[in-house]
Image (tube, rainbow, N blue to C red):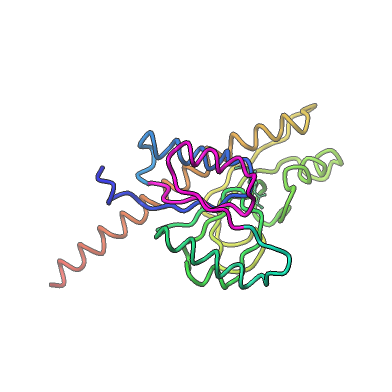
Amino acid sequence: MNRTDLVRLVVLISGNGSNLQAILDACQSGELAAQVTGVISNKADAFGLVRAEKAGVPTIVLEKNREQDRHAYDLQLAMHTAAYQPDWVVLAGWMRILSMKFLGYFPGRVINLHPALPGTFPGTHAIERAYEAWMKGEVKRSGVMVHLIPDEGVDTGPVLGMEEIIFREGETLGEYEARVHAVEHRLLVKTIKNIITAEEFRRRENAKSHSICS
Ligand code: GAR
């Protein structure tokens, strides 16, 4: 596929970047008709930056300093993100809540990965909190979801993909966490693939209706 036909993804990270890696691998193998045009991290020591650089993807580190206003930071982040001309912005382990100062630039174009089911364990340490809830007998299952971010809600928004994970008797937190990550890597790529397919379908339908009208 011609590189100009590839869907442009900008990925925002804060840490390890194993989900970024899953996206990079899927772009590389052709599973995703997409390219990562830029990676932005709010942490200078995020290992995901090394992964991006290894894949030849441009990176930016944009740390928020204490004195900086949240909205000023988000606006600056939006400018850097826009410079990579994304079709989609993917939050893959991005651990800051984004305000409308950022989201307003990419309406309906920001997706987030969260390691729990819709409406459960919003915010940080969702994997640990779900595991603790299971240990206390409060839940039997948790999961992973990918959703749109329309507003400033924390890990809320229209769900694009989800997968349940049933806890296994006797499993450790580490074992559960490894299962969550394996599901995340698969689900995130699958959801991005579905988005690309859906957009392509819509584009063709629009082209058809224009040719009928003209
Ligand atoms: C993932 O488990 C992701 O779901 C989570 O951060 C981790 C990042 O891992 N995100 C959130 O908790 C967002 N609320 P990674 O850096 O290896 O991709």
Rendered location of residue 79, percent (x, y): 49, 66
Relative depth, front residue between 191 and 90: 90
Q: Residue at x 48, y 36 (%)?
A: 54
Residue 134 within the segment the image draws in magenta: no
Relative depth, front residue between 102 and 66: 66
The C terminus appears in which quarter of the rendering?
bottom left
Residue range highlighted in magenta: 35-62
User: Residue 57's image quarter?
Assistant: top left
Q: Residue at x 57, y 73 (%)?
A: 101
User: Residue 56's image quarter?
Assistant: top left
Rendered location of residue 31, percent (x, y): 38, 37
Count of numbered circles in the view: 0
Q: Is residue 195 above or below residue 186?
A: below
> Is 189 situated left or right of 183 in this image?
left
Toward the left, the furthest residue is 214
> Is 18 situated left or right of 109 in this image?
right
Relative depth, front residue between 66 and 174: 66
Q: Is residue 71 above or below residue 180?
A: below
